[in-house]
Image (spheres, coloured by chain):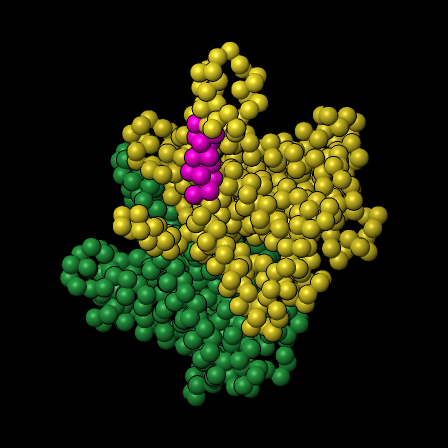
Amino acid sequence: MSKSIYPSNEKKSLPSKNEAKNVSQSIITSSAKLINRLVRHVFLPMAGPSIAIFIALLLGAILILAAGENPIEAYSALFRGALVGKGSILRTLRWMTPLLTTGLAAVVAFRGGMFNIGVEGSLWTGGLAAAVVGIYVTGLPPIILIPLSIITGAVVGGLWCWIPGIARAKYKVDEVVFTLMLNYIAILIVQYLIRYYLLDTTRLALSFADPETRFIQPAAELPWIVKDYQLSVGLFLALGLVLLFHFLFRRSVWGYENQVVGLNAIFARFGGVPIIRVAVLAMVISGALGGVTGAVEVLGNYHRFFGKFSVGLGFDGITIALMGKLSPIGVLISAFFLAVLKNGGAAMERGVDVSRNIVVVVQALVILFVTAERLFELFKFKQRHRAEE
Amino acid sequence: MLRLVFSVETLIAALHIATPLILAALGGSICLKSGVFNIALEGFLLIGSFTGVVVAYYSNNVTLGVLAAILMGMVFALIFGFFTLTLKANVIIAGLGLNMFALGLTTWLLVAVWNSPGAFIQPSTPVLPQINVPLVGSIPFLGKLLSKHNIIDIGAWVLAGVTYVFMHRSVVGLRLRAVGEHPEASTTAGISVIGHRYLAIALSGMLCGMGGAHMSLAALRMFSENMSAGRGFIAFTAVIFSNGNILSATLVSFLFGFFGSIAIRLEGFGVPTHFIQMIPYLMTIIILLLSAWRAYRKTNPKQKIKQEKVLSQT
């Protein structure tokens, strides 16, 4: 039987019939192992979020129906607008870029047991810092200027989350409210700085309604992958970061400590983990990733900083982290899904007369359902019951 | 400048701004005392203000608008309760989800039903009538301060007293507190933990619904996108600061209202609007830090393990 399935292998490593059998068998077992691993690590964890997404889409459909529109048409317009055709997919990837990094930011913080809602604030402050470097640090070649600018964004974003991080870890200040309030403050400070110090005076009429900075130098711009669809190499950077954190969580001491502190701080303490330092670091890294997101948005897409800079990307990160079960690979999948919803939502608004805000509703429902543990216990219990019978 | 800032008008405006904060803080206090960490106040406020103005406009009746807002607040509270209590979702995440749901739903309805993105403005919407209590108006300083408030302004302070009595002098109130203090013992005593927490959440939803109706129906006659703008969280901070103590939460909410009204006053003095808008949020952070500092000083720094126990529990 093995002969018919794997003829090429048998031919290549011919020495004896037995050995060939072994090779083909080992291929079968290893592929079975791979499938097993895939099922256990990718498909099973996806079951819960998939159910949550399904219910959320269903409830969204009911809302669309209640508003007197056809939900099937609306959803098909949404998915067609995001996935069919080269331009649609590229634009979806463009939106996936910032979502990957904000999703990672939320994952790092949540794994460390910190409910960081302040990624949005880091995004604004970090983005502005990157823009300032991109505009005013002159005379450097791109190979130095771009990393410098992104790192500045990361540092500023990280410092922004360091404040609530240290307050939470040392003094037990509620980090949810603290980071949320810091978001409002960050946005106001950034708008103040643009309005009074960084305003683009060459286009004042335009700037007054919606304050903007000058464009960054061409040397600071991230190269495009496809210019027409605003897709820059920021995508590769984001994907690289996802991979990096995948290995950090799996293989590094920091990844382990971060997770243990999040799961059980007392256990971690008795295990000799410096829990305060680890918790603060989780917040700082989370903020730094937010800053990187802002920097990449500025250097990669807009090439300047303006008033309506982020459309709640930091909050989307929370959805993505929860949908992805706090794993970087999960972030990859759910960031893509949310990018589809976001990009397709705009297409849906153009094609069918259904406002794209329904996407926010669906997103909120996903958040609600994805953590509703009992819901999935119900499903699991039924499965187990059936297996016993 | 100082005279203008600390004038009767500022205090009147403070009372006005504080009303939704007080109502939300009352709801938050009940929840905290019964062991529910309710950060969904923001969403309840938002849905209340939306329902209030829409129903008041279509029925041309303010009372109906307020009642509908209270009802809708309760419905959303029950949804929140369903997720956190029945489906055992994480309270903070479910709270964030609910806030986002309220925001998304109201923003979407503005476009889907009225095709008016950003805001629902109907000048013909009836507003809450102002009540002039006889005799009070003739008192020299207080008269000016206490007249010309609408029924919810007054109701917030009355409800603060009622809630205090309810929580501390009634059987249900005692049970609510018991459920928060020691759930296991309450279960042993035959008190339904989930049932009472549902009640607490429903009450907070109703109070927030009323507060929301005040935001849209007191003077503005409109609803705008994300109208609550963090007020739910500001109220929540007042609750944390006072550790669920109802009277103190009310006063801290009023203090926040006072800061808000000072901020409005300062606008005429050339302070950049960005910083003025920042004041409520900054004050919230300061109060938050103060309450944490107080708790930190109480715990003996030498008992580090004890502290970290708390850290791991939350």
Q: Where A114 falls versus B60 (above or below)?
A: above
Farthest residue to the top: give it: A15
Whole-percent x, y for residue B167 in the image: 27, 68
Please give left or right for residue A95 compared with residue B136 in the image: right
Q: Which of A52/B260 is in front?
A: A52
Asked where in the image residue B67 lies, by quadrant, the reply is: bottom left
A32 drawn magenta = yes
Q: Which residue lies furthest to the right in this view?
A: A202
Location of residue A69 (image quadrant) = bottom right
Along the line of sight, the residue nearer the viewer: B22 or A261:
A261
Q: Position of residue A188 (x, y in %)?
A: 62, 51
Please give the name of the residue rendered at 43% of the width and 35% of the height, measured from the top-left corner. Answer: A36
Bounds of the magenta segment: A29-44
Colour yellow, chain: A
Q: Is the magenta stretch mostly helix, strand or loop?
A: helix
- Magenta stretch contains residue B180: no
User: Quick check: A362 above or below B157?
Assistant: above
